[in-house]
Image (cartoon, rainbow, N blue to C red):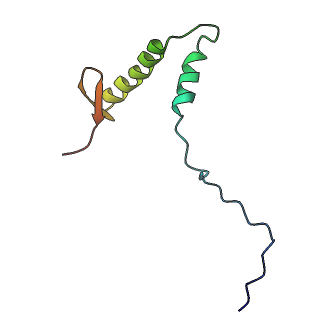
Amino acid sequence: MRTPPIDLAPRPRRDHCTAGTPRLPTRRQRVTTIMNTAPRRAWSGRELAEQLLTQLAEWARLGFLTHTSAGTYALDTPP
């Protein structure tokens, strides 16, 4: 029994992100974007959370999410 020879040829790289699919910003990127609106300002965690909740409220108004009660949201899925 013989083992096959080791192939030392470089393999083509696989790009995990397709060129036509835009990536959604990460939570860190969203927070950094908010903080860059006033870069010298010190932001509290509460202020940043409020900014992100504003985004959730906007998505609820656009129909992407459902605002179920104070501070809670759910996916807007058909019954």
* Image quadrant containing the N terminus: bottom right
How far across and how far down the image is residue 10, in percent?
79, 66
How far across and how far down the image is residue 16, in percent?
60, 54
Exactly how many numbered labels are in the figure?
A: 0
Residue farthest to the bottom, as pictured: 1
Residue farthest to the left, as pictured: 79
How far across and how far down the image is residue 62, in percent?
33, 30
Which residue is at a point 62% across and 51% down the rendered structure image?
19
> Considering depth in this image, is 20 or 45 the residue closer to the camera?
45
> Considering depth in this image, is 2 or 46 the residue closer to the camera?
2
Image vertical order of residue 28 relative to residue 7, above or below: above
> Considering depth in this image, is 78 or 74 the residue closer to the camera?
74
Which residue is at a point 46% across and 12% down the rendered structure image?
47
Tell me the quarter of the picture where residue 66 sits. top left
Which residue is at a point 54% across and 23% down the rendered structure image?
31
On the rendered structure, is 8 left or right of 23? right
Which residue is at a point 55% across and 28% down the rendered structure image?
28
> Considering depth in this image, is 11 or 56 the residue closer to the camera?
11
Residue farthest to the front, as pictured: 1
Residue farthest to the right, as pictured: 8
How far across and how far down the image is residue 70, in percent?
25, 20
